[in-house]
Amino acid sequence: MSNNILTIKEYFDNKTFAIPHYQRGYKWSAKEKDEDKSSVHFFCESIKNAYINNKKADYFIEAVTVVQENKTAPIILVDGQQRTTTLYLIFIVLGDFDFLKDVILDYKIRKDSDEYLKYLLASEGKIESNTTVQDIFYFNEAIETIKDIFNEFLNDSGFKKFIKNNVKLLFNTIPASKAVNTFIALNGLKAIMKDEELIKSDILIQSSRPLFEISGTIDREEEFGFEWKINEDRGRLARNWDKWLYWWNQQEVRDYFGIGDRHPLYFLLVTYWKIESEDSKKSFDFQNFKNEFISSPRDAKNHFEGLRKLQKTFEDLYNNPESFNLMGIILKTSNSKEEALHSFLDKKNESKLAFSEYAKWSLVNATHLEIINNTKEINSKTNKEHLIKMEKAISAIDLLNEKFVYWDENDAEYNDSRKEFTFRFLMYLNLLEDTNLKRKFDFSIWNNRSLEHIYPKSKKSNLDFEKTEFQEGSIHCIGNLVLLYGKDNSAFGAKDFEDKKQVYFNTGKGLEFKSRNLIHTLSVFANSEWDTKDILANKKKTINILKAQYGIN
């Protein structure tokens, strides 16, 4: 790729601009839903304001990406069709016909559009308003908008000079071999080409085509009707796709699903692939998706509708507090998020587990196959067959039942998984409280966590765990720990129980104390006192709750 900065005059000195076959029609004068201004309006307003603010300053518009084999060859507009056409119409409105006399906007793929642009130049901007051709309709709308915005500058030669010499763009040239892929990438996410963009391009093209071949001879009016309908359908489908993209691109959604560097629609498309693909051995990629789902207009329409329904399901699950909370556990802990989502969203799967069942097993690191298949193995101690997922749950809860889960001062080989399971289970208990209140749990705690000692560890000598009835407890056992959001840890410090209660319940200050929303944590600080017996009682209570969740005797 090569880049040059060109003035609009230098850009138009290239003379011939070709609109390739994969470009859609001119639509910049169309208003988006919920918008009262078009792209033409914003484009012209920005140029007008730049001229008013400083007639001598340079003003840059967005870059164009083109194919140009040599300096005298026509420019193929890969990305920049709408801007170039709008600039052409601006000079029509400003009456600079001499400037345009050698400029060719080659719309030969749309014969009527091509002829109308030539007519506008020849007739010096005279509009033919009686039209059924979509491009011409939007050309005319753009001209009216340009006239309204530039009305006070129509006879201002300085304004024309400003646009030609001070308005500039970045002129990117690419090899012809990369044109189509670059077009799809630029019109998808302005990012590197991925399978998901290829899927978007093909499914939109196929879905907007007629389900039948047009046979025989049709008159011009019918031809216009078909063209208009195809463009409208493609636009409608593209708006649906863009709405999905907007939803998945919200930061809270990206964080919740753990999208990371993946394409925002990855989980929508891969889940649909796993649900609908007839060959489970085939991997998810563009060619397989295209061959199976986009082989004809009818297939494309059906699968686009299937994607729309699946997207609605994702949004419904996300908006419902119970499914949001339990699915959140799965997304954070599952060894295969793709398989987990598939198992829940596949309506053909009659044996699928409830979210609550899957979530609790995922929490103890049971794999997807161990969960759904009830995989068994021989226990080496009992020589009996046991469910692997149950063994993992028993092992995790046994770790939590030890005297030291936060830190074992006597154990040089301290098992850090105790601390991880302590966090997970305390999070789970808080999440269950939120679910009962029909409230979404805040999963930002996953990467912003803190385990807080209720009775400060700096004052552990004041507690007596030597008595027989208290020997199962310690300052570092699960009974003396609560979950906090990480940044709240410093507010507690080494304070004693009463002072920590004051911090927790004092709503008159420190309103940013996020951990106040943790209901299970709050319930602990609701105790009137906190000593050895309370710590041990809380430990037993917590272990019993968790055993009940897993059906452990």
Image (tube, helix red, strand yellow):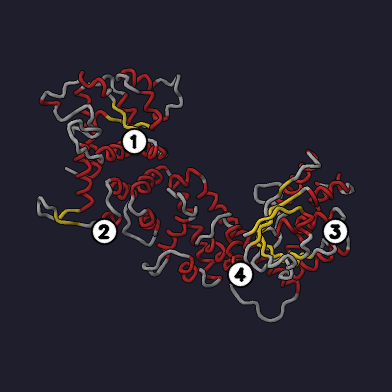
Dot 2 corresponds to which residue? 373
Dot 4 corresponds to which residue? 209
Quadrant of the image occupied by residue 342? bottom left
Residue 98: x %, y % from top left: 88, 60
Disc 3 from disc 2: Cα separation? 73 Å
Residue 41: x %, y % from top left: 74, 48
Reply above or below: 200 against 41.
Answer: below
Q: Label 4 sits on what residue type?
A: Arg
Q: Label 2 sits on what residue type?
A: Asn
Element at label 1: helix
Where the C terminus falls, by quadrant? top left
Which label's residue is closer to the chain start, 3 or 1? 3
How packed is label 2: few (under 14 Cα within 10 Å), some, or many (20 or more)?
few
Element at label 2: helix
Which label's residue is closer to the chain start, 1 or 2? 2
Dot 3 corresponds to which residue? 99
Q: Are marks 3 and 1 in contact (CB under 8 Å)?
A: no
Dot 1 corresponds to which residue? 430
Question: Is residue 198 rendered to the left or right of residue 74?
Answer: left
Which label's residue is closer to the chain start, 1 or 4? 4
How packed is label 3: few (under 14 Cα within 10 Å), some, or many (20 or more)?
some
